[in-house]
Amino acid sequence: MRSPILAFQPASSLLMSKLTLLWRDVYSNYPVPLPFTEDELDRFIRMSGICLDLSQIALADDQPVGLSLAGSDGDTAWIGGFGIASLHRRCGIGLAMLRSQTREFDQRGIRNSRLEVITTNRARRLYANSGYVDRRRLHSFNSPAVGNSADPLEVVPLEDLPALHQRLHVGVSAAPWQRELPGVMRAVERDHLTILGWRGPNGIAAYAVEQNRSGLTHLVDAVAECASSAEGLVSSLAARSRGRRISLGDEPSNSPVAKAFKRFGASPRIQRMEMVRLANLPTEVRRVRDYAMA
Ligand SMILES: CC(C)(COP(=O)(O)OP(=O)(O)OC[C@H]1O[C@@H](n2cnc3c(N)ncnc32)[C@H](O)[C@@H]1OP(=O)(O)O)[C@@H](O)C(=O)NCCC(=O)NCCS
């Protein structure tokens, strides 16, 4: 049987309705259900800073069979969705599409790109074969809240968020791409979310961006400068949520907030690996490894 003719194009060449069908196809039997409607995919693209001109689709004999959704900010990029339609897997299209995507990054002068992958997903090998190296584990929580501290949380004005984000998201708490400042600001502004701060002796030492969904308190972002401020924040959020579940996605596993969640009885529901790749310059290879180990 002849092999299909493969081609790659910017995802902006596909109508949104067709892009949605392709998204649903590539994620049809994914462990986390992602059956987006067209509106939901559109919202995901806007909220995640995905750029469809930078993103790629794979065509086999002119039929869309693969999707790589990517965004960038200056010389940094991220891949926020990646998959191949089930009937076309295991024939090399995923690796070829990723290489096409990273070529696009390199041509645009993007110096580093990152992505996350469920630790047990075989896609990790594919990413490793394209130059991505493990950086750190990310844990996602979605647990009934426990905690009875009633430390008052105070509402933080939106204009204070950039400085707080920059001060607190450092070291082990460096933000994953979903929680970089522009994305958090977009979510707060669009959904009129409340930023709750926990005050320590020297000012706000932890904050969370709270989004109430039916029966669930979802934290769009949460960060703390140390173990005690993380405990103060998490236990106050738990007391405030009065038995509802609290969810937080992609928290660095060694951060004070992740440790506080675990101390309060929450166990990570999903574990993902953040992987990073520096631009394909031979002199950078050692620095990729240094960055990954930091
Ligand atoms: C992960 C995924 C993108 C891989 O796409 P793919 O097109 O199957 O990838 P490839 O064909 O390039 O490689 C996959 C495997 O097939 C093997 N393969 C490639 N060509 C092959 C061939 N002709 N015959 C047999 N095996 C082949 C590769 O060696 C690789 O093996 P490995 O897993 O042991 O390393 C795809 O399975 C998928 O879309 N999964 C659901 C969505 C998902 O998990 N996305 C990742 C989110 S982070």
Image (cartoon, helix red, strand yellow):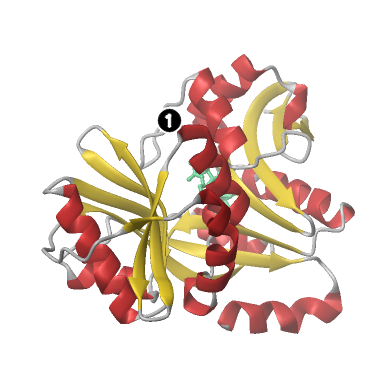
Image spot of residue 105 (x, y percent): 79, 53
Q: Is residue 34 left or right of residue 235?
A: right
The residue pinned by badge 1 equals 28
Residue 262, above or below 285: above
For residue 269, what is the image quadrant? Answer: bottom left
Near mark 1 (Cα within 10 A), the count class, few <14, some 14-19 or many ≥20, is: some
Quarter the N terminus occupies: top right
Residue depicted at 19% across the width and 36% down the height = 215
**Residue at position x 29%, y 66% from top?**
233
Q: How many labels does the image show?
A: 1
Q: Is residue 267 among the parts visible in the rendering?
A: no
Q: Does the residue labelled 1 lie within 8 Å of ligand 1?
A: no
Percent coordinates x, y for residue 37 in the rendering: 47, 20
77 with respect to 193 (left or right): right
Q: Is mark 1 on a helix, strand or loop?
A: loop
Residue nearer the viewer, 182 or 198: 198
Q: In this view, does 139 lie above or below 216?
A: below
Question: Where does the image place residue 161, in percent across and percent down from the top left?
Answer: 54, 57
Residue at (39, 68) in percent of width and height: 206
Q: Position of residue 82 (x, y in %)?
A: 58, 43
Name the amino acid, label 1: Ser
Front residue of 128/118: it is: 118
Q: Can residue 244 be seen in this view?
A: yes
Quarter of the image that includes the C terminus: bottom right
The residue shown at (66%, 84%) is 290
